[in-house]
């Protein structure tokens, strides 16, 4: 019985480690970021703040933004990420005033607005 419990404990420990690796997937300048990177790295963690359910962004939101930032170096990547975030903002009801404050909360200068308008993505 004791070995069985130890097996379950190891399984959950490994599962937690895999979750940590997946949610902290840095995107470096040698590879451009994608919409999928946003969906994995920061969108789930920033959404509660962006829609008004949390008073401040989760620390994982800031870490994910920071990890994705290095992969947005080309104008086309910026446009693609902007369009991805615009669709999410419209679908989920992100509040633009909150989106503007995330850079301040996280002490970052993320190159794409988190609740962009369609016009923001044309720049």
Image (cartoon, helix red, strand yellow):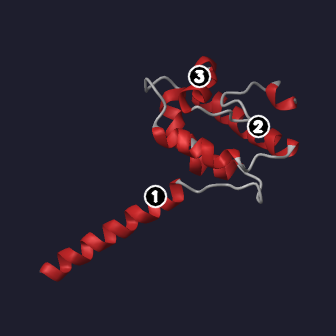
Q: Nearer the viewer, residue 81 or 56?
A: 56
Mark 3: which secondary structure?
A: helix
Mark 1: which secondary structure?
A: helix
Q: Are marks 3 and 2 in contact (CB under 8 Å)?
A: no
Q: Taking 100 as reference, is 3 left or right?
A: left
Tag shown at residue 20: 1
Residue 13 visible in the displayed image: yes
Mark 2: which secondary structure?
A: helix
Q: Which residue is mark 2?
A: 83
Q: Between label 3 and label 2, give the one nearer the viewer.
A: 3
Residue 94 visible in the displayed image: no
Q: Nearer the viewer, residue 69 or 77?
A: 69
Q: Taking 29 as reference, is 1 left or right?
A: left
- Residue 35, position in %: x, y? 70, 48
Residue at the spot 80% in from the left edge and 26% down from the top edge:
120
CA–CA distance in space, label 3 to label 1:
26 Å
Q: Which residue is mark 3?
A: 101
């Amino acid at each position: 019985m004791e070995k069985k419990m130890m097996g379950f404990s190891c399984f959950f420990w490994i599962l937690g480690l895999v979750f940590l690796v997946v949610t902290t997937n840095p995107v470096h300048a040698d590879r451009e970021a994608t919409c999928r990177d946003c969906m994995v790295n920061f969108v789930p963690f920033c959404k509660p703040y962006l829609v008004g359910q949390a008073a401040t962004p989760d620390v994982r939101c800031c870490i994910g933004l920071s990890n994705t930032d290095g992969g947005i170096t080309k104008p086309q990547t910026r446009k693609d990420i902007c369009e991805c975030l615009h669709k999410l903002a419209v679908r989920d009801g992100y509040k633009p005033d909150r989106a503007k404050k995330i850079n301040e909360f996280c002490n970052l200068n993320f190159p794409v607005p988190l609740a962009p308008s369609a016009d923001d993505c044309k720049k």
